[in-house]
Amino acid sequence: MNCYPELTYSIYADGELPVEEARQVELHLGECQRCRELVEELRSADRLLAELLRADAEEGVAVPAFPALPARAARLRGVLGPGAAALAGAAGVQALIAWIGSLRLPAGYEWLDPLRLNLSLSVLFYGLRYLIEEETTMFTSMIGVAGALALVFLFLAGGWLLLRRRVTTAAVLLTLMMALVLVKPSYALERRTGRGTITVPAGQTVDDTLFAAGDAVFVDGVVTGNVMAFARRVSIKGTVKGDVICFAQTLDMEGTVGGNVFSFSQWADTSGHVVGSTVNFAQSVSLRAAARVDGDAISLAGETHLDGAVGRDASVVGGPLDVRGNIGRNLRTRTGRVTLVAPARVGGDLDAYVPRKENVRVDPGATVAGKSEMHLLAAKVSRYRQWKFYAWEAVCLTGALVIGLLLYWLFPAAFTFQADTLVAILRKLGVGFLLLVATPIAAVLVAITLIGLPLGLIALALWLLGLYLAKIFVAAWVGQTWMEPPAGKAGPFVLALLLGLVVVYVAMNLPYVGGLLHFLIFLMGLGMAFSQIRRRIGTTGQA
Amino acid sequence: MDEATLQAVARRAQAGEPEAFADLYRHFYRRVFGLCRRLLGSAQAAEDAGAEVFLRAQRAMSTYDSRLSFSGWLLSIASHYCLDHLRGRRVEQRVFDSRAAEWNEPATAAPSPLAELLAAERSAAVRAALEALPERTRLVVALRYHGEFSYDQIAAALGLNRNHVATLLWRAKKELQRSLLALSREPKP
C-alpha cells in the first residue's frame, strides 16, 4: 500500500481527518515504520507549538481586577467628556457671535458689520455679477466644487462607517456637531403661504420680514422688514422698507422699496421707487419712465428697457438694450445691441461690449457726458485652440517638475508611498478636506489675537504652499504607481514625476470635469502630505 | 476548575450572577489575553482587547449555549474581536504607517517555565521562526494552538477554506521543524 502525502498525516495528527479516512491511515501506519515516525514528528511539533505559544503569551501576565461596569462607565465618560466640552465650546462661540451681533455700530459704519442680511445678500449678488463678467469658467468650477463637497460628505460618511473607532472620525463628527450648533438663529419672520392670493392690504403693516408663497402675492400695505416672495405673480404697490427678493413669473414693482430688489422672474417691471439697487435675472426687464432706482441697476436679461432714472451705474448683460431714461453715472453693457433714444442721458461713460460696431446706436437727442467706448467682442476662441494656453501650462508643468525634483532631493523619504486601498484613498480625501477647510479658519481665528497674527500668517502661507505642493505630491504618487512594476523597484523618479505631472495637468484641464478633478487633487495632496508628515513624526519618535 | 464545574459557573453567570462571571473572568483572563496577544502582536493591545472581550462576553451571556464549551465560546468572541481589530488596523497602517505591528516586542522579563525545558536559544529560534511566518499563517497558528479552534472554526473565522487551513498549519509545522533542525546543526559558540 502506498504512503499518504505528508499533508494528510498533518491533518491526521491534528485529529481533523474524517473518520473513514483516519481509519485507512491508521491501517497504513500499522505497517509503515517511516510514516509512523513522520506522524510522531508532526505530533511533537504540534505539542511544541501549543506549549510554546501559550507559555510565551501567558507567562507573567497579571490578571487585572475585574473591569466589568466601571470600565464601561469610564469609556462612556471618555466619549461624553470631549463631546460635552465640544458642545460647551460651540455654545460659547455661539454666545460670542450673538454678542458681537448685538453690538450696534455707529451710523455710517454699518457696512463693516458682516452679519447684516442685506449686506450679505448684496455681496452675494455683486459677487454673481462679477461671476457673470468672468464668463462661465467660474460657474463650471463652482458647480464642480459644490459637487465635490457633496462627494466629500459622502466619503466622510462612508469613511465613518468603515473606521468607526478612529480619531479623525471623532474630528469629523465634532466638526459636524459644531456646524449644527453654530447655525445662525433664524430671523423673526412672518410666513404666509397658501394656494391662492396672498395680500397685504393697503393700510396694513407687517412689522417683520414677510415670507410669502402662493399663486399671487400682492403687497399693498407696508412691510417693515424684507419681502421674500415665491409666486406666479408678485405685485408691490405699497412700501417695503427692507429688500425684496422675488421668484416669480411676473414682478410688478409700483411701490417703494427702501432696500434692494433682487428678482428672478420672467418679466420684471419696475415703475416705483427703489432706494437701493435692483438686480434682475429675467427674460425681460423694464424700468418704466416713472421708475426711480437710486442705486445701481443690474440686469441679466433677454431684453432690457431702461426708461426710468438710475441714480448710479447701470450694468446690463444679455439681449438687446434700449435706454430712454437718465443714468446717473456709467452705463456698462455686454449685450447684442445697445440703443440710446432721446431723451436718454448717461452721466458718466458708456462702455459697450458688442459683437459689431454698428450695434451701438446713439440717437442725436441722446447724450453721453463721459467717454463712449466700444469694445468689439472677438468670436470666442476655445482656450484649447490657443497655443498660449499650452505654452503656459507647459511652463507651469516644468516649474512643478523642478520644484518636485528639488523636494525629492531634499526629502526623498517624503516620496515613498505605500499601496493604497480605496478606503485609504477616501480617508486621505477626508483628511485633505478637513485641512483645506480647517486651516484657513484656524489661521483667521488665531490671527485675531495680536500674538497669533504672525502664527496665522505663517499657517496661511503654509496652507497656500501646501495647495501648490499638493499637485506635485499627487503627481509623484500617480507616476510611481503607474511606472512601478508590482514587485520590482521604482523606476527613475524624474520620469515617474514627469509622467504623473502630465497626467495631473491634463486631468485638471479637462473640459467640464477639470475643476472637480483639480479640487480632488487638492484634497488628495493635502491628505497625503499630512499622512507623510505623520509617518515621519512617528518614525522619528520611535528612533 | 474542571469542565463540569465551569459549565455550572457559566450557567450561574448566565442567570445574571456577577460573582460567577468574575470567577470565569479570573479563570480565563490569561487564556484570552494570550490569544489576543498572539493575534494582535502586542501586550498593550492585548490588555485592551482582554477587557473588551470580557465586556462583550458579559453582554452576550444570554446568547451562550450552555451545552457547548464555554472556553470555545469565549475564545471565539476574542478571535472575532481581534480579527476585526486587525482589519481596522491594517487599513490604518496603509493610511498612516508603513511599519508592521510591533510583533517583535521583547519577550517578557519574567522567567518562563519553559526555560527549564528548552534552552533559551531554542525558544528564541522557534519564536523567530514563528515571527517569520506570513501574517495569515500566524493567525491560523494562533487560533489553532492558542484558541484550540477546529479547522472548520478557523476557516470560518478567517474566511478560508478547510484545505487551505490544513496546508497553512502543515507549513507552519514544517517551518518549525526546519528551524529546530538548523539550530541543532549550528556549531555552538
Image (tube, coloured by chain):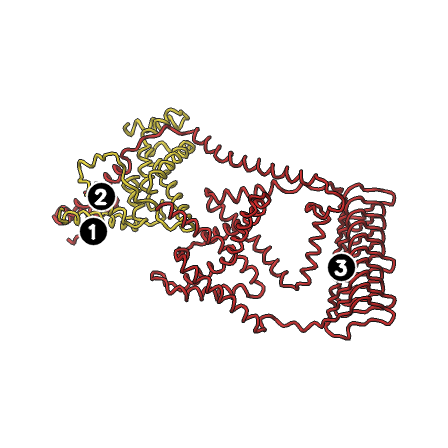
Q: Which residue corresponds to mark 3?
A: A298
> Residue A195, how many percent across, how many down?
77, 48
Taking depth in this image into account, of A454 and A332 the one nearest to the observer is: A454
How far apart are labels 1 and 3 at the CA level? 88 Å
Q: Are marks 1 and 3 on the same chain?
A: yes
Q: Report the mark closest to the observer, 3 or 2.
A: 3
Q: Which residue corresponds to mark 1?
A: A6
Taking depth in this image into account, of B145 and A162 the one nearest to the observer is: A162
Q: Are marks 2 and 1 on the same chain?
A: no
How far apart are labels 3 and 2 at the CA level? 83 Å
Secondary structure of residue under mark 3: strand
What residue is shown at x 51% (from left), y 56% (from top)? Answer: A465
Amino acid type shown at disc 1: Glu
Chain shown in yellow: B
Q: Colour of chain A?
A: red
- The answer for which chain carries disc 3 is A
- Left or right: A59, with B18 as reference point: left
The quarter holding residue A493 reads bottom left
Q: Which residue corresponds to mark 2?
A: B124
> Residue A386, how many percent across, how many down?
58, 73
What residue is shown at x 53% (from left), y 53% (from top)? Answer: A461
1 or 3: tag closer to the N-terminus? 1
The quarter holding residue A331 reads bottom right
Asked whether the residues under the numbered discs 3 and 2 touch, taking CB atoms below 8 Å apart as contact, a structural biologist would say no
> Eyeballing the image, is A415 above or below B186?
below
